[in-house]
Amino acid sequence: MSDTPPTPHAPDDNLRFKPYTAKAAWPWQDLAADRATCPVAYSAELDAVQVTSYSGVKEALLRHDALSSTYSDLWPLDEPLPEHKQVLGASDPPRHTRQRRLLVKALSASRIQHMRPFSERLADDLVDEIIATGPVFDLVTAYARRMSEGHVAELLGIPSGERDAFARMAQLFEASIEDRANHGFSAELNDWITHLTELVRSRRAGEDTGDDLITQLCLAEVEGDRFDEKEIAALIQLLAGAGISTTQQAIVNLVYLLDTHPQQRTAYLADINGLTTSLVNEGLRFDGPVLGLWRRCLKPTTVQGTRINVLDKVFPVVAAANHDPEAYDRPDEFVIDRDWSALPPHLSFGHGIHYCVGMNLALLELQVAISTLYRRLPGLRTVKGCEPRQMPGPVVRSWPTLSMEYDSPAGVRNT
Amino acid sequence: MSKRQISGESGVLSVDHTLCSGTGHCVDRLPQLFTIEHGRAWLADAAALSTVDTQHLHEVEAGCPWFAITYQPRPPAPAEESSPATPGLE
């Protein structure tokens, strides 16, 4: 009997998850069918090994020694990223370890809790503006994006005169995802690296100082060495771009879930304080901002006993893991009062060394954004006839716009 | 009672709560040593560090995405001095 593990099936055209050619608004049934067929299968659509079980996704995300994160930007690449662009989620140890060490303290649970008053004030201000401008608004541009931009700007210490420009940069990431054939706005994003490199030089020269994360990154030293200017610039770009878009998407996804599950919305309105934490966990499980993550195999390994060959692309489908019946009872039901202390963690923040470094900030933003919105606008609902479409591609779950209206405001400000 | 630090013959294992975010990677790897309470990782009071292979302790330290776990192996006790070999008899 051979000890050689099996390889994935030959490229399978029959898999139902087709995020490029026929992205479903709600992909859970397709992903369940693929999981039932084979949880580690070679997808012709993705040209990659698609992993759809909870245990398989978790295992793949722990295989960072063999499955590299350096071969993808917004799309899978044939060559690794240039070294200065290998940052955080797009880097491997030891480079990844060195960068992440710089960030964990500033983004720790204990530190981020201090931002709660800022967070509540910002959410209230945005709702005030929505109320002032009338009963119909776009949730993305009027609330979710500005909530997310505001938190990232505050944390990073983006100069007030540059906040709109940074927000525009974050939107380039999103816009680029839709334009795979032309690599989107790669050139403009590269110009941003040049601009951010100048910002790093200026901070290092002491022309502009502060106690913010950008300054901390610029001045950080490891064993007496400072980080390369371009490396810090790419880190800042990633923190701003990814940090803004993912949380914005998570807020919108969760509001749309509540809107499409009226019984759950009613239950939430009856106990906002008691249910916000479990609601946010369930929202991230049921429809988090990330569908899946790209990896590239650089040395032979296995996932769930299936062999992965060198240079295979691997795509752990986080959203499929979060709907695996082996991990969750009634996985395709949106249940806002699950007891998360007794459940395995959802994988929307990833798993292993690349676990989302901004998790604590994202949780704070989501909890405050959702609770403030529904406390103050309990009659919130999508405009009749609004049928949002999903942004194409395999990486993100995002409703780019969501037209909403509300009955008379009822709640008062947090502060 | 749970603790933030335990020591045994092989060394000292500790959790830094200023960094820990309670995501439970440590519990996944060594459920006999770690628990999550109130959003942070704790070391079980009765934990017998000596029952865990030191390699696993190094792995749990390296596997924490928040760098909140530290394992400091105890340096080996100095060897007892032995009688110098007698030249010419080896």
Image (tube, rainbow, N blue to C red):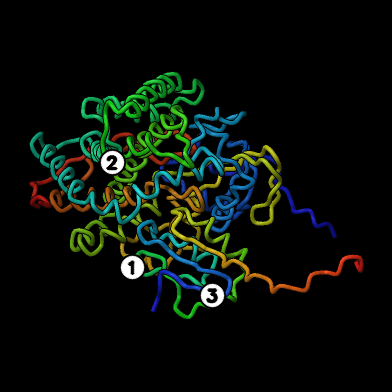
Mark 3 surroundings: few (<14), some (14-19) or many (≥20) residues within 10 A = some
Q: Position of residue A92 (x, y in %)?
A: 56, 41
**Residue position marked by numbered label 2 in the rendering:** A155
Most distant residue in the front direction:
B87
Q: Nearer the viewer, residue A312 or B56?
A: B56
Q: Residue sitting at 57 percent across and 61 percent down?
A: B58
Label 2 lies in what chain?
A
Q: Nearer the viewer, residue B79 or A250?
A: B79
Q: Nearer the viewer, mark 3 or mark 1?
A: 3
Q: Residue sitting at 17 percent across and 50 percent down?
A: A117
**Residue position marked by numbered label 3 in the rendering:** B8
Quadrant of res A192: top left
Answer yes or no: do the residues labelled 1 and 2 have beta carbons within 8 Å? Answer: no
Instruction: Give the number of the disc on residue B38.
Output: 1
Label 3 lies in what chain?
B
The amino acid type of the residue labelled 3 equals Gly
